[in-house]
């Protein structure tokens, strides 16, 4: 299991309609999926659950992880998830939450994680499975 205080975790949550969950943080005009860093000693899955619950109030079930290597020591892991329930309140740091199409997401952000997120959600046509999975 991966653990690092410098690991960035992005939760890729896709609705059955193909839309991707994104939040708009207070003070920001752009949209992003729930994202954040792992705490020292925290697993990727625990970090993904914590960031999604904090930002959206959703409880998630992880379905797969997709590792991307960033520049320097910083790595990025996209955790593909399903929503399994709603429980907590939405973070006061979040202004709004929406399900965006891929086109909307691409047009409303220029973040370095966008390509990684979309690659993780894209099925491998030959096997019907998401690309570059890392075991959970």
Image (spheres, grey):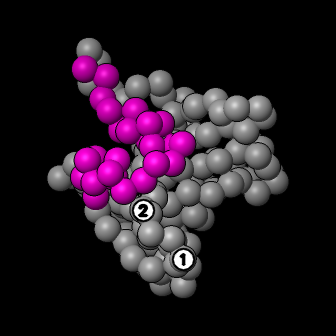
- The magenta stretch is 100-125
To which residue does mark 1 refer?
Answer: 27
Left or right of residue 23, residue 48 in this image: right
> Which mark's residue is nearer the viewer, 1 or 2?
1
Residue plotted at (52% across, 78% down): 26
Res. 82 visible in picture: no
Q: Residues within 10 Å of mark 1 (few under 14, many from 20)?
A: few
Q: Position of residue 31 (x, y in %)?
A: 42, 62
Looking at this view, name the residue that lies furthest to the top: 126
Left or right of residue 123, residue 70 in this image: right
To which residue does mark 2 refer?
Answer: 31
In front of the other: 115 or 6? 115
Q: Quadrant of the C terminus?
A: top right
Q: CA distance from mark 1 to mark 2?
A: 11 Å
Residue 116 covered by magenta stretch? yes
Q: Is residue 111 above or below residue 29?
A: above
Residue plotted at (37% across, 30% down): 130
Q: Position of residue 129 (x, y in %)?
A: 33, 27
Counting every numbered tag in the picture gives 2
Q: Secondary structure at mark 1?
A: loop
Q: Is residue 22 above or below residue 106?
A: below
Place residue 125 in its image quadrant: top left
Place residue 96 in its image quadrant: bottom left
Q: Quadrant of the N terminus?
A: top right
Q: Secondary structure at mark 2?
A: loop
Q: Position of residue 100 (x, y in %)?
A: 28, 58
Q: Residues within 10 Å of mark 2 (few under 14, many from 20)?
A: many
Looking at this view, name the residue that lies furthest to the left: 17
């Amino acid at each position: 299991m991966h653990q690092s205080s410098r690991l960035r975790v992005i939760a890729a949550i896709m609705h059955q309609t193909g839309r991707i969950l994104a939040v708009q943080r207070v003070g920001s005009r752009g949209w992003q999926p729930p994202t954040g860093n792992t705490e020292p000693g925290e697993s990727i899955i625990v970090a993904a659950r914590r960031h999604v619950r904090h930002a959206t109030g959703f409880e998630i079930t992880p379905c797969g992880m997709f590792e991307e290597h960033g520049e320097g020591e910083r790595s990025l892991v996209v955790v593909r998830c399903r929503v399994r329930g709603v429980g907590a309140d939405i973070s006061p740091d979040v202004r709004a939450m929406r399900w965006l199409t891929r086109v909307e997401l691409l047009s409303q952000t220029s973040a370095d994680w966008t390509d990684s997120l979309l690659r993780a959600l894209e099925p491998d046509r030959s096997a019907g499975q998401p690309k570059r999975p890392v075991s959970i």
